[in-house]
Image: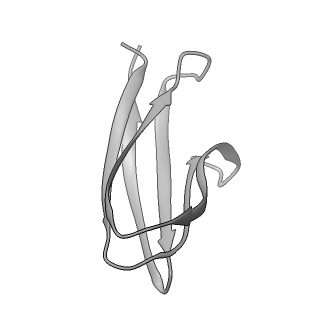
Amino acid sequence: NPTTKMSFVIGHSSLVSLKVFDLLGGEVAVLVNEQKGTGSYTVEWNAEKMASGIYFYRLNAGGFTAIKKMLLLR
């Protein structure tokens, strides 16, 4: 199953960016890059064409930033 879902909650309307990076820091996907209102969101990433390995995703919303690691196995 080459897809995964990422969920996040926005406390107030802001510009939201959710991007996926490879281990070397290269951007491999932009999942969200738009203004979002208050609420819960779920975004699906289809990694069908990606190689197995470690990836990072970064969520920016207003002044908040979170970076998490994920492992893609084939």
Residue at figure coordinates x 62%, y 17% from the top left = 49
Residue at figure coordinates x 57%, y 22% from the top left = 51
- Above or below, 16 relative to 47: below
Residue at figure coordinates x 48%, y 53% from the top left = 57
- Above or below, 70 relative to 65: above
14 relative position to 41: left or right: right
Q: In the rendering, at what x and y percent does residue 33 appear? A: 63, 57
- Above or below, 4 relative to 38: above
**Quadrant location of the C terminus?**
top left
The quadrant in which residue 50 appears is top right
Furthest toward the front, the residue is: 37
17 relative position to 5: left or right: right
**Quadrant location of the N terminus?**
top left
Residues 68 and 61: in front is: 61
Specify how the rendered protein is coloured.
one colour
- Above or below, 40 relative to 28: below
Residues 61 and 74: in front is: 61
Q: In the rendering, at what x and y percent does residue 68 appear? A: 38, 57
Furthest toward the bottom, the residue is: 63
